[in-house]
Amino acid sequence: MDLLPAETSQMQKRKGFRSLKLVNVNMDDLLGEKPFGVEYGRLDNGLCYYVRSNSKPNMRAALALAVKAGSVLEEEHERGVAHIVEHLAFSATEKYTNHDIIKFLESIGAEFGACQNAVTSADETIYELFVPIDKPELLSQAISVLAEFSSEVRVSPEDLEKERGAVMEEYRANRNANGRMQDAHWALMMEGSKYAERLPIGLEKVIRTISADVVKQFYKKWYHFSNMAVVAVGDFADTQSVVELIRTHFREKIAAPSPPELPYYPIPSHEEPRFSCFVESEAAGSAVMISCKMPVDELKTVRDYRNLLAESMFLSALNQRFFKISHRRDPPYFSCSAAADVLVCPMKAYIMTSSCKENGTLEALESMLIEVSFEFLVFGPVSSPLIHWTDDVQVARIRLHGFSEREISIVRALLMSEVESAYLERDQMQSTSLRDEYLQHFLRNEPVIGIEYEAQLQKTLLPYISAAEVSKYAEKFRASCGCVIKTIEPRAIAAVDDLKSVVLKVNALEEERKILPWDDEHIPDEIVTVKPIPGSVVWQQEYPNIGVTELRLSNGMRVSYKCTNFFDDQVLFTGFSYGGLSQLSENEYFSCSMGSTIAGEIGVFGYKPSVLMDMLAGKRADVGTKIGAYMRSFSGDCSPSDLETALQLVYQLFTTNVEPGEEVRTVMQMAEEAVRAQERDPHTVFANRVRQINYGNSYFFRPISIGDLRRANPLQACDYFNRCFKDPSTFTVVLVGNIDPAIACPLILQYLGGIPKPAKPILQFDRDDLKGLPFTFPTSIIREVVRSPMVEAQCSVQLCFPVVLKNENMMEEIHFVGFLSKLLETKIMQVLRFKHGQIYSAGVSLFLGGNKPSRKEDARGDISINFSCDPEISSILVDFALDEIFRLQEEGQISFSLWLLCCHLHIPVLLLSPSSVAYFQENYYWLERILRSYQSRIYSGDLGISSQVQDECRGKVRGILTPLIAQLALQRILPSPCTKQYTVVVLMPQRSRWKLLKSYFRTPSSTRDTKVSNSRNMMTHWELSCILDVDGDCWCDGCGSQFMEILPNHFEKLGEIAMEEASQAYAFYYKENL
């Protein structure tokens, strides 16, 4: 059967890279101070500007205003002011009030958060906009907004009070386990410098009490045009006209006569390493961090660039080793990685991080130090202050034996593959990526030399960077750089002296040369050792309305492909088959649900992950698997030239079996650690309770327990996984991207068509006959508070409504419910954030995933509204939200502007304006669209008709959508009124049992006799044990001593029995936690 004729081959472009000429350079040649490919200059007032034309995405512009003013400039009484200024910029300026900037930007399709945002760091503040420019005036208006940010932010007491709550909520959200760990590490790394005490979020007392005058003084003092740059990258027809727009909006702004110079804040070095054992009861697990600080390297010459490449090769080779160690039998850690990161302007750090089992931090540290170790001289015991550290932190195995040439050849191929892909897609770079490059040029003075020259440099330099040169980067780990070794544990196990002992041990092994060379594994030459016999095409169909070709292969597999030119170096694909975990009984479920996890650790393509990593070096081919409730699927992303490799992986997936081995123990350890971490995490406890309330206690929705894991059968798990990907006749595969059919189709026939079809069908299901998940939304109102132990008070709210979409109007209802989700999110933000100023953000999510893909039944699910807030006002905010939704339903208070705003934000589904063209020029969009057409309820064998009907339904909804229609849809899809059926679950801090216990003691003297006489009846053994349950409290020596002082004073109050029980309970706790 004839296939489509060959189109322009992507191989010609790849040959273009491989024939790219090398450059004849001197190591001292300068890279160039002027950034490449951009209109670059300064206005008379000192403002710097960068303007570049770029067509990706179409009719969009990525804009930014960068200000070299961050939290490090704050005085003690100003801590947090830089961040407050950023918030106030979106709140009110001279031209815009009451968050009108946000409303205007959303009205043109720039969604708050995704397309209009800002970030404050220690050294700078960056305001970012991503706006449509299909109308001439939009770009000018967007640039005028940046101009307002630069000098016209209005800082009044009223504006500050409105925004204070939102800033406070952002602060509160940052005080979770991750935030506390990051803040503690920052303080440790920056100790001795001003940076250590200038976290951008600031201090709570400053946020709550700072005056508008102080905020205004900071803004006027540091926001000067000599410290600013405007960056504009977008689909501009003429860059000069954009430069003129910048001049128009900024040139009349007068520079300050004598702005203060930006101060330089050094970070003192320390020759002695710092050790820390950080205990975080809500941590997701145990971890080890090794950091080495050093000044930021200059990047001005070709030699500097070569050094940067060598550093990248060093870190990549080190990460390859860490990955392989983590996949050995009984590994010392679950994962480990190394990276170089610029932390602040004057300093960068090499940072190695590992995650490990709860009692495994010392073992993980030892393994990491085998690769990177300290030397120090000891003049006393480990705990003695007489320890003297030598000047350099030495790399143990690498210093002794170096990297092998094979290791370096692998990382060289990886870097070459990355730059090749970037070169091939140089005309398809996203505007946001280019904008970020120019921001770094302004803020960090990083050269922008263009991808063409960079590709030439890498092709010229990489082949001559030797293993010995890369291995020398181990010397960068020096104690004089300022090294920090830190463990993170949910409960204290390791101590500082333990860390020092591990360092001594590894150092002794190095000195005695007892560290063996790295042992490379054997790597097969070919992924598929015996090429399969190609299948054939038994049926072919063209769908010109969506540009798709569909093939039915001889083994029963259906394959569709769409050729695009959106990205030259991308091919995406997904294969799916109906039937998943919902078909399993409860006895089978827990074992089989572990199948993907266990198989992934063993290797699903016939090779161990550590071996496959080396086999794929220099190739861009990635394939993953997923087993869901109703479907099994595999997905991939590859370069067109590596499509054969990607399809070989799919062939291996279907033709090799996963068998449980020694890796299972590691998988189960990781799973147990994850379960324990979830039990410690208040937000996971909250999410589990929400699921239980809304979906019942079915084993599909119930969180996996340690007991479930220990009952899991690895053999059954692997067998189920193998059966999930065995029968090609049940699978539909969709490929989208830069596909040359003349090259791709023979590969499809060989590796997909060559998958043998089993004699009997395996896991073959009709989509209409699948078992549904057992869940039923509550029929009444439920309002529940989940109290969980917390280190610091957090509060999360989920307000949920049931949704029913009728089968007869399903296609239209899907679009309506998507629009309504955005309508609700926008309205909740307007009320709770911009009107009351009590939340930072809100999200509205739609869940329909519990429905089986039947074409005969209604779809049930829910719409949930999520936000975090002050625990004290959570109930009030829930009522505010319910009131607003009620008004939208019953009173029709959907203003035209709100309706129009939501239409703009829902462009990908409802609108076909020029600004939405960018969305349709993505391979991911077309892959999802084709998959949805196959999986649609209206699909009956004709992909073109299914896609056409979906388009018609979109058009129908778009044509009839008005504020009144939106109101009727809210009444139809949600319970009406909304107040008759919903659930509200609120996460709150657990009440302190210590405070509860003290409340029993706080009795007026006049009533003491009565209460004493009833003391035994007042507090039972069980009640006292509940109060003294230390799992929910953060006890310390101080409160414990207070407790022991109170008990004797209230001896007669508790009674002898209660006194004895309380004393024993406290003594037991103190012994266990001493």
Image (cartoon, rainbow, N blue to C red):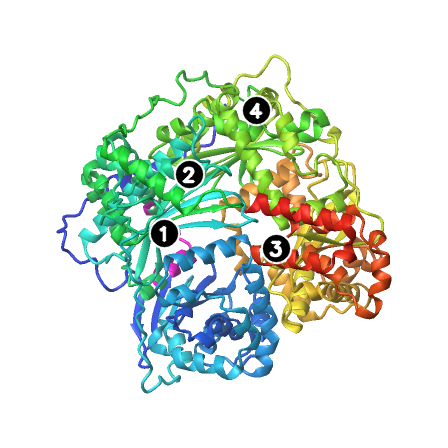
Residue type, label 4: Phe
Q: Tell which tag, 4 or 3, sits nearer the viewer.
A: 3
Pointer 3 or 1: first along the chain: 1
Mark number displayed over residue 362:
2
Task: List the residue tagged with mark 4.
Answer: 725
Q: Is residue 334 visible?
A: yes
Dot 4 falls on a residue whose secondary structure is loop
Pointer 4 or 1: first along the chain: 1
Pointer 4 or 3: first along the chain: 4
Residue 265 lies, in percent from the top left, at: 32, 68
Residue 561 lies, in percent from the top left, at: 51, 35
In contact (CB < 8 Å): disc 2 and disc 1: no
Q: Is residue 797 visible?
A: no
Position of residue 634 in the picture relative to residue 997 (left or right): left
Local crowd size for mark 2, using a 10 Å CA cut-off: few (<14), some (14–19), many (≥20): many
Q: Residue at x 32, y 87 (%)?
A: 257
Tell me where the magenta segment starts and ends, as one range. Answer: 423-438
Pointer 4 or 2: first along the chain: 2
Mark number displayed over residue 427:
1
**Disc 4 from disc 2: Cα separation:** 40 Å
Residue type, label 3: Gly
Mark number displayed over residue 1040:
3
Local crowd size for mark 1, using a 10 Å CA cut-off: few (<14), some (14–19), many (≥20): some
